[in-house]
Each structure stands twice: as C-alpha cells, then as structure tokens.
Amino acid sequence: MVLAATGTSQAADFVVSVVLLAAIAHAGWNLLVKLGDDQVLAFLLLNATSAVCGAVMWAVAGSPHVAAWPYLAVSVALHVAYNLALLNSYRLGDLSRVYPLARGLAPLLVTGGAALVAGERLSTVQLAGVAVVAGGLASLVWLGGAGSPGGGRSVLLAVVTGVLVAAYSLCDGLGIRHAHDTVGYAGALFVIESCIIVAGLASWRRRVPGALPRALPREWLRGVLGGALSVATYGAVLWAQTRLALGVVSALRETSALVGALLGAVFLHEGSARRRVVAAFLVCAGVALLVVA
C-alpha cells in the first residue's frame, strides 16, 4: 500500500479520519442540492463557486506536472458527465435511494480498476472489507423499497453515476500521483470542469425567460455553500489518494452513502431510518476490516 511510505500508524489514522470527515461533508452538500426547489440552479451555483475556489488554488500552487494532464483531461470529461447524471437522478428520485446506490458501486469498481491499471494488491481481509462496505451500502437502496419517485430511470441514472464516480476516482488517483502537487491538480480540475458545467447550464436556463432571476434569491446560499463543501471534500480525497491505496480511499469515502441515506430519511422524510440499521452495521464492519488490516 502507498501508506507504507508515509511511516506510522498515526499517519494512517489521520488520513482515514480526513476521508471519513470528507464523506460526511459530501453527503451534506448533496442534501443541500436536493433540498432546493431548483436543482439546475443549485448545480450552476455550486460549480460557479467551485470554479472560483479552483482558480485561487491553481494560482497559488501553479499548474500540475505535464505528465498529469492526460489524466486531467479525461477526468474533466468524466466529472462533467457525472454532474449531469447526478443532477438528473436527483430530479427523478429520492436522495436516500439514488445517493447510496451511486456511491455504493464505486469501491468495488475502483478496487478492481486499481488492481488492473495501478498494480495495487489488497489483502484478503481488505478485499472482504471492500465487499462488505459495498454490500451494506447497496442494501440501503433495496431496504428503501421500490416505490420511490422516478422508478427505473432514477435507478439507471444512479448506476451510471456510480460507474462515473469509480472511473474519475481511478483516473484522478493516477493523475494526482503524476502531478507532484495535489493543490495545483485539484485547482485545474475544478476550474476547467466547473466552467464547462456553468456554461452549459446557464445556456440551458436562458431558454426559460425570467427563471434565473426568480430562483436566484432562494438558491444562492445553498449553491455557494455546496460548492465550498464540494471543493473541500474532493480536495481532501485527492490528497488521501497519494497516501492510501485507491480502493481503500474509495471504500472509506463511500461511507457517505450511509450518511446520505439517513439525511434523506430525517430531512426529506424518505423511507424509514430503522430499516437502515442492518446496513449501517455492515458498513461499519467493512470499514473496520479495511482500517485494521
């Protein structure tokens, strides 16, 4: 594992704590988007904030190493597709159903991808932990019942979102190791990705006369706060990917699905939190296997 190069178990514990905090914050900004009346505007504002934050990071740290740019270019395309899939899945389905499925798919896919293209090998116990985490997160979806709004289309979009999460996680995990600077890589990614999304969504919204001025006063605070949280959480994940195996970071990060499901149940009254207790134990057990192995 990459972590072996950093030295102590205390360093490992710190990295794990950072990723888990990022997971909680990630679920938080997704809740902010879902709480809004206008998800399109929320995504527009979120990405505008992300672009501003990224510009500051890029200016301070400078550009990433030239070897990282091919990964960065692919990652931008994957992130744009991810944002569109996530936006439409939220327009059709419940947070507590869409979010866990989208996030729960990623650990298994990232672990398999890292083994194929990065030569990473996890122990048998760690592989079991990844499988248990993914199973626990996926079960959150089916425990929620099949009658959520959007039906099959929201589930399909959630699956597509999960595949894109795994793809960009793997791509960025490799790119950040060629960049030689986490802040510069993250800043460039946020600026390029977010500018594309903002331009596209703004163009689409202009087709609805007067919609933007009417919705802006209601949505701007959620969008800006969500953008700041988005930058902080993914920046932390990129940093962690230089210190832990990609599959481990992905599995720890996707515990956000548990938080998202509970937030959906509490704040959006989606499903029953009681039904998610078994899944929560599975997730915790899987994380424990990853951390102590």
Image (cartoon, rainbow, N blue to C red):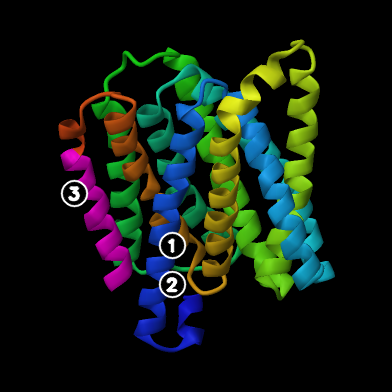
Left or right: 134 as drawn, with respect to 26: left
Q: Spot the residue most to the bottom.
A: 7
Task: Determine the secondary structure under disc 2.
Answer: helix
Please tell me whether residue 26 is drawn above or below residue 67 in the rendered image. Answer: above
Circle 1 sits in a helix, a strand or a loop, which is it?
A: helix
**Residue 218 colored in magenta in the image:** no
Q: Amino acid at mark 1?
A: Val
**Which residue carries the number 2 mark?**
15
Q: Which residues are magenta?
A: 277-292
Asked whether the beta carbons under mark 2 and mark 1 sit within 8 Å of each other, the answer is yes
**Residue at the farthest right position:** 66
Q: Is residue 97 left or right of residue 244?
A: left
SS for tag 3? helix
- Say which amino acid is labelled 3: Phe
Question: Between disc 3 and disc 1, whose residue precedes?
Answer: 1
List the residue tagged with mark 1.
19
Which numbered circle lies on residue 281?
3
Query: In the figure, is residue 25 to the left or right of 188?
Result: left
Q: CA distance from mark 2 to mark 1?
A: 6 Å
